[in-house]
Amino acid sequence: MTRQQPSWETLNAYVDGELSAGAAAEVARALARDRALADQVASLTQLKAATQDTVRDPDGAVEIALPAPEGRRWRPLAVAASLVLVVAIGLASFGSWRGAQSPPWMVQARALHDAWVPSQEPAPPKVGGVVLVALGKAGAGGYLKAYLPDLTSARLTLTRLETVTLPQGGGLGEGVALHAGYRGTRGCKISLLVLPSGAALPRELTRRDDAALRAFAWRAGPLGYVLLAEGMDEARLVLIAETVHRTTLENAPFDGETRTALQESRERSVPCLA
Amino acid sequence: MRDPRRDRLEGYLSRLFGYGLSLTNDRDQAGDLVQECALKALSAVRVPTDEAAYRAWLFRILRNAFLDRRRRKGQQGQAVELTDEMALDGNIWCSDDRLISAITVRLGLAKLSRAHREILAVIDVVGFSYAEAAALLSVPVGTVMSRVSRARQALLVCIGESKVRPFPVEARRAAE
């Protein structure tokens, strides 16, 4: 006699503890003899727990891992050394790109920023909290780690998290990059691009203005970062850029003082013009 | 001196927020709903003494506040759409558990219909039983059971389609 498999509905009710003792025992027996079924229940249990976690107050950084370019691996010592160097230079001052023409990295970064139109997103996802994700599939080369900051205290919500395959010959280098988009409540939007290689970018936090667009670029370990915004209050944007820059170097969540500063800066600022 | 009514309510705030978030898909609006709900609960003349009844009462206040707002905005016609339901054909669903993390679930939830988000919030975040959820939503228990399973399937599909992947533990250790 063939035993009938529990239905998907029944498995869900089992995970939710909604079955009678007899029905739950029957499911338990089915799980014991069917590994695939047991895997489904394990996934459902994990899904339920992750759903519970979604409402926890965001506090800290979003941790992202990028596939490593060939021949390059994450080297904590090298990053620590660059961290010491940059901190010694000071975060309050940053360089500005000189030259009449926009640098190649900025042209490509701007195209990505402009292509993102938050108002056209059907249902902007709300993302916050400490999470650990990777882009693409794990390759033999391992991963590079990057941290995306949670800017909730600045009233900016991470609503976009997409991978972008950079074309050959572009200003941002090659490989798979991450485009993180933060939306404000008063029309602001900030793009943060995480590049698998920062070779095309200036080593230290560097600012470049082009008409209304403000771009900040820097390297952190082997990774490159570009932060872009337009129409945003000057003091607020500078504070955000410096804070994000520091976060990517320290790989640590904001402290209370930083969160307060971001919050106060937002309160003092004027709404975005863009 | 502490107010026992306020203390009792505080224990539910995060879950009320989670439920509000599932209804609005917007943190600011969810916060406003919780505030409105809290004001009504604290100023109510009669408050249920039984904890289960109190909990159901609280979440009903929040839901009614949400529906009132929708009505004022003329959006009542879209309140219970189940646009992303899909046929449950009995095939065994197979997933890579590594895809399931807080971030992929958040991104996935935002893509679901409000009804699917709501049922998952009521069951997984608020912690209602199917019977309690049925009372809150004014539907039969069987509908809750069906809606939960469809919502989870829709969520798993969204997660599977996402380009964002949880970072495998082994790779994370290697990277560190």
Image (cartoon, rainbow, N blue to C red):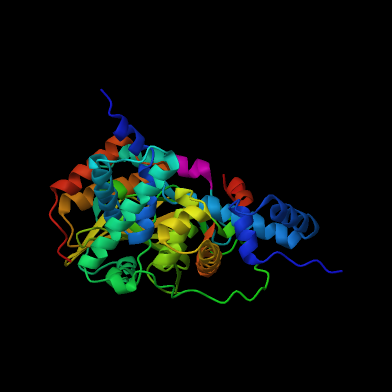
As drawn, B89 above or below A48 = below
* Residue stretch in magenta: A75-81
In the image, A8: left or right of B122? right
Nearest the camera: A152 or A181? A152
Nearest the camera: B105 or A188? B105
Farthest-out residue, right:
A1
Q: Identify the main secondary structure in magenta.
A: helix
As drawn, A26 above or below B77 = above
Residue plotted at (31% across, 74% down)? B77
Q: Give coordinates of residue A129: x percent, y percent.
A: 41, 48
Residue plotted at (73% across, 52% down)? A25
Q: Give coordinates of residue A1: x percent, y percent.
A: 87, 69
In the image, B28: left or right of A127? left
In the image, A183: left or right of A35? left
Q: Give coordinates of residue A268: x percent, y percent.
A: 13, 47
Q: Give coordinates of residue A109: x percent, y percent.
A: 33, 67
Quadrant where the image shows the C terminus of chain B: top right
Residue A76 forms part of the magenta stretch: yes
Residue plotted at (16% across, 67% down)? A211
Residue A91 forms part of the magenta stretch: no
